[in-house]
Image (tube, rainbow, N blue to C red):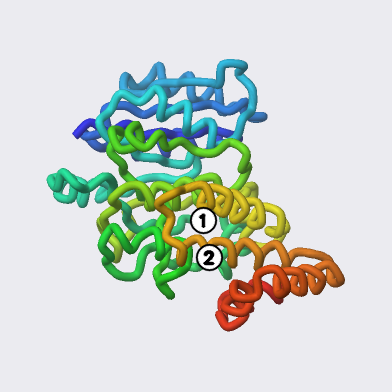
Amino acid sequence: MKISVIIPVYNAEKYVAQAVESALQFQEVSEVILVEDQSPDNALEVCEKLVEQFERVKLFQHPDKGNHGAGESRNVGMRNATGDFIAFLDADDFYLPNRFDAEKTVFQNPHADGVYGAIGVHYWSEKAKEQFYHIYQEKLATVYETHPPEDVFPGLIGMRGSFGLFSIDALTIRKSALEKMDLLMKTDLKLHQDTDFLMRLAFYTNLYPGILDQPVAVRGVHESNRISQLDSGKVKPAKTRVLLWKHLKNWAEKEPKMPKEELLHITRIHRSFEIAHSPFFKKWGMILKYLVLDFKSMRSGLYNINFRKTLFQR
């Protein structure tokens, strides 16, 4: 196996060296691709030193050397990857020694396009632990049971009950599968672009479970982590989640192979976020509108407890 590990780098001078070294511990990793995204700190200088120190580390920037977000940074990495397989790692996270153990077995199946596993949590400081422990604790982010590939997409969009989730840090994908499906990350999403990517990837490719009961990578939590700010409520989730599900709905409507049930579910979730995060009077106006224009969809949604929780949250 020749694995290209792609690391987008933004404001991560304190963490990126450990991320790189955690990837280089594996002989299967043929290259670590750093994509520096106009960091406001000294991350670029740290990346340049890592390139000098390690032969397998490569450094890229955007053509205009500007800031384009994690999605486009990962796209730069995918376009320049030379390995047969691609794995991802955030610059403030790191791999554990078992990261690619499952891949060695699963990829013997020629029909396996990708492998996903579980990730754990690491608090970079006591202050970060005080702020975010009530959210993440010591929990695994994982899929709770083994599922065949055809169940992964319905599971990720919430049609399989307590399916769970997996992080992009725990995903390994054949490069040929990405090229065949022309799968890149969407650049109009500043947050959740990895969630959107994983859902579309699960629809088009065969993703198999790897190690689900113990972490293969660790998510680093610190005070300036954007997703931690979002999960804690310090950054309002309304707009980002509405945009994510709007994006998925627009894609699903154009996808000719999308089953009607899945399309209905995605539409329902988008509507629930759209309505839930609207002002009070607009909220009830939108409910009335959808009851009139699409009574069947709204009625079926109102009978769904997860839909109601989203719809009436403040």
Quarter occupied by residue 87? top left
Quarter occupied by residue 297? bottom right
Q: Secondary structure at mark 2?
A: helix
Mark 2 residue type: Leu
Q: Residue at x 61, y 30 (%)?
A: 68
Q: Position of residue 121 (x, y in %)?
A: 45, 58
Mark 1 residue type: Tyr
Left or right of residue 313, residue 91 in this image: left
In this rendering, does residue 52 appear at all? Answer: yes
Q: Secondary structure at mark 1?
A: strand
Circle 2: is it few (<14), some (14-19), or many (20+) Cα within 10 Å?
Answer: some
Alpha carbon of mark 2 to alpha carbon of mark 1: how far? Answer: 39 Å
Q: Nearer the viewer, residue 123 or 72?
A: 72
Q: Nearer the viewer, residue 268 or 171?
A: 268
Q: Position of residue 50 (x, y in %)?
A: 42, 23
Point out the image quarter for the N terminus. top left
Camera-near label (2 vs 1) is 2
Which mark identifies residue 281? none
Residue to which mark 1 is pinned: 123
Q: Residue at x 41, y 20 (%)?
A: 51
Quarter occupied by residue 215? bottom left
Q: Nearer the viewer, residue 83 or 263?
A: 263
Lower sequence index among marks 2 and 1: 1
Q: Position of residue 2 (x, y in %)?
A: 23, 31
Q: Position of residue 302 (x, y in %)?
A: 62, 80
Q: Residue furthest front?
A: 293
Residue 184, placed above or below residue 117? above
Left or right of residue 94, residue 193 in this image: right
Residue to which mark 2 is pinned: 264
